[in-house]
Image (cartoon, grey):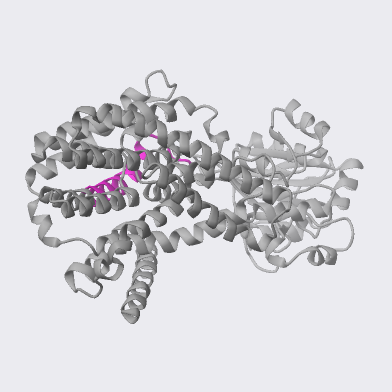
Amino acid sequence: MHDTFLTTVSLLFVLGIGAQWVAWRLKLPSILLLLLAGILAGPVFGIINTQGFLGSAFQPVVSVCVAIILFEGGLTLRFSELKDTHQTVRNLLTIGVFVTFALITLLAQWFLGLDFRLSLLLGAILVVTGPTVIGPILRHLNAKGEVGSILKWEGILNDPFGAIFSVIIYEAILAGDFAEVGSLLFVGIFKSVLLSLVFGVAGGWILHLLMKRRLLPDFLHNALTLTFVVGSFTLSNTLQPDSGMLTVTLMGIVLANQKHGDVDHILEFKENLRVLILSSLFVLLASQLDLDDFSLLNGNAILFMLALIFIVRPLAVIFSTLNSGLTWREKLFLAWMAPRGIVAAAVVSIMSFRLMDMGYESANTLIPLVFMVIIITIVIYGLTTPLLVKVLDLQNEKPTGIVFLGANDWSIKTGMTLKELGVPVLFLDKNAANIRNARMRSLRNRKGNILSERVMNDLDLNSIGHFVAVTDDDQVNSLGCVRFANTFTHHNIYQIRPGTTPESVDEMAPDPLIGRPLFLPTTTTQDVSQRFSSGWQVRQGDVPVKTTLAQVFRANQNQAILMFVVHDNGNSPTVTIISEEDNVDENTLPLGPKDSLIYLAQMETSLTFPPID
């Protein structure tokens, strides 16, 4: 028995992570590969028998795993994302959930012939959308505007509500008292929300207080957080079944939105844990399937699923976005994005097994039906949304803008020149006078400290693809590079050398955390400031002939500091930031008549552009 348990756990881990790796290599939705791995390992080849391996522990194990996933989701929700969209999110979680619940209940009776009780249960299960599915799709799409934050908030918050609805309706089915289902729903939701507010908010606040006042050593942060999550989940569930899912979601939101305190290390730990749990859980749930049950699905089941996509979701969005201020393109995109994921799979597995044990044999149709909804919605939305977002003109192009850390005189002049050429720029500085100077020149700006978590979260980086640190304080520049290392790739992080010797930069922090040194030739912040003060100007020169950066550098190295190249690609310009790492002994970067070179030189100096030999 002991060996069987260890073998099964190991297989779940191996199959889950293996499916994730294959999905990454093939660029396919990982959930599809996870479901396939579970079906092959369970009903097809019988390699694992998860029911025998978990037995009565199946429900609590699955529930705790889902709770950890929802807590991690709550950690990603920032109130700043709701500045202009809180009304839409609220409506989707109220009006949208009710419309979805009611329509699915009716459609389940019409198309599937389910009785009223099971139709209600199916409606409650399928009100959820899958944040674990939506997240990867949105990251791949890079959609404009607020649709991404709306879908993320909706997906994470409606999951616990769907689970609560399902439990209340399940209890009504067992009690056989559907005359009181309305009051049961109201009382159950009220108790769940109340308990979640008490335990979720209190738990998040206590955790924050312990970390803020340093009453907890760093090495215990993650362990105690996980303990709080499981403990609060269990306590809340004891008082009101399945209210714990909302409790842990709210706990994550409370932690994520504290003004003081950094939860990045907790989020990173939970993200890693989520990947392992999500992968293993999907394999576990898929291995429970009985392939014979899929034979119960017929043409009416397909019509039901199509109605979910083409009727239910659009109507829910239409009623939820009245007077929202969203464009018709954004509304259409919201109407075409409601995949189901892990919560729907977990809830239907738990509820169906309970009902079948109680003698409701028709409940065996729910599991294959919900899993087919998961598969079909993931395939349809995953394949069509990349095309739809382009047709609706909601996709950001590859971000080419620059965020400058430091709004000094010469960097502001550089930003003005870049902006005139169509390159988005954003200035970040804690000095009020510097920010005022940038604002007076109509440059995007944000006053704040680079160490502030709130400042980092409030930055709008949709069009930004590069980070350039140019303050007079090299420690601030180095910290800026560290802070933005997870936002941009190391290749797109730049830092001007300090006014002392170049070697001192390398002594400040390990190389992977320090930006690429700016400009050609080797330049320090003192060099640029002194030359700018002595009359050198930030200038722009259009490249008249085909040449290379190496040739231009050799021809002008004693007369100018080469800074940026802006390429006119016809649609939106792209920018190359010149670094001393560029190998000027080779023809590294080709330049041509559609390029503009930004450089620092005296007013009377014009660059020489030698043609290619």
Q: Position of residue 467 (x, y in %)?
A: 67, 49
| Front position in the image: 426 or 595 | 426
Mark yes or no: residue 67 visible: yes
Q: Position of residue 473 (x, y in %)?
A: 84, 50
87 falls in the magenta region: no
Residue 354 x, y percent position in the rendering: 22, 52
Q: Along the line of sight, which residue is nearer the eye, 107 or 513?
A: 107
- In the image, what residue occupies the spot 67% across and 44% down? 453
Decide if residue 155 is on the left or right side of residue 206: left
Expressed as whole percent of the image width and height from the top left, the position of residue 369 reads 18, 49
Q: Residue at x 71, y 58 (%)?
A: 515
Left or right: 366 in relation to 184: left
Q: How many marks?
A: 0
Quadrant occupied by the N terminus: bottom left
Residue 392 within the segment the image draws in magenta: yes
Q: Which residues are magenta?
A: 373-396
**Figure check: 22 above or below 59:** below
Residue furthest to the top in view is 323
244 and 98: which is toward the camera: 244
